[in-house]
Amino acid sequence: MQFLSAPLVIILIIILISIRQINQYQRGVKFQLGKYTKTLEPGWRLVVPVLQSMKKVDIRVKAVDVPDQEAITKDNISARINAVIYYKVKDAAKAIIEVEYVHHAVSQLAQTTMRNVVGEMDLDELLSNRESASKRIKDIVDSLTDPWGIAVDNVELKDITLPEDMKRTIAKQAEAERERRAVVIKAEGEVQAAENLKIAADMLASSPGALHLRTLSTLNDLSSDQSNTVIFAVPLEVLRAFDKFAGGGEK
């Protein structure tokens, strides 16, 4: 009985040390004698020591903070950019077999891609269309990392830093643009005012007594302040009326 218990104890010990736990957010890549056999799902799995081995792969979304990169835009302006890339492992076996240090590889690839994409865009396009630049970077990195079993979820450009002299130039350009808009708006207002004055003049000219009523209304407004000195220009119509009266009297 004691002779049989020793092998059983040894087998039990081997089974116990062969148990591997794979969490829900992990996958296990199993090798037998150095050769890939299969990908293990979450749970308790047996991995026989010496003969078999297993590497766990985290399949949760990871963030890669891409450091500042010096890039030259299409119109030869230097800019420093940084970004963050969100990716996850979609094929655990490829992430182990095809590439070493996935996180580092994705970061290096993103840095190169960022410089290339920025080099294809003008500065104005880069500043106004960050989403377009981010999408282009995402599409390129996603296609290049597909053989590694990686899926890129999103790319966000965090900051675009320009040289100080370029910042001053952009500020002057923005100020000039605001001044131009102000001049245009003022000119449009003057045109509308002139059109309204023309309409008013036509209305007054079409009615013989309207101009006199307008003149009397203006005089009434001026009479409220006794300190004003008013020089009254008599309309030609009034003078002509006096001429007619004078002519009638002589007859």
Image (cartoon, grey):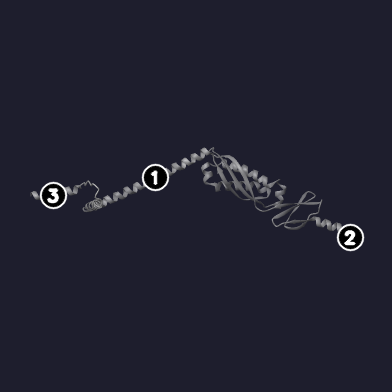
Quadrant occupied by the N terminus: bottom right
Q: Position of residue 169 (x, y in %)?
A: 49, 39
Instruction: Read off the residue under disc 2.
Output: 5
Does residue 52 appear left or right of residue 58 in this picture?
Answer: right
Q: Residues within 10 Å of mark 2 (few under 14, many from 20)?
A: few
Q: Position of residue 113 (x, y in %)?
A: 61, 43
**Marks 2/1: CA distance?**
100 Å
Taking depth in this image into account, of 104 and 135 the one nearest to the observer is 104
Q: Residues within 10 Å of mark 3 (few under 14, many from 20)?
A: few
Q: Residue furthest bottom?
A: 1
What amino acid is found at the position of numbered circle 2 in the picture? Answer: Ser
What amino acid is found at the position of numbered circle 1 in the picture? Answer: Val
Q: Residues within 10 Å of mark 1 (few under 14, many from 20)?
A: few
- Which element is circle 1 on? helix
In which quarter of the view is residue 70 placed?
A: top right
Q: Earlier in the sequence, mark 2 or mark 1?
A: 2
Taking depth in this image into account, of 230 and 195 the one nearest to the observer is 230
Instruction: Read off the residue under disc 1.
Output: 184
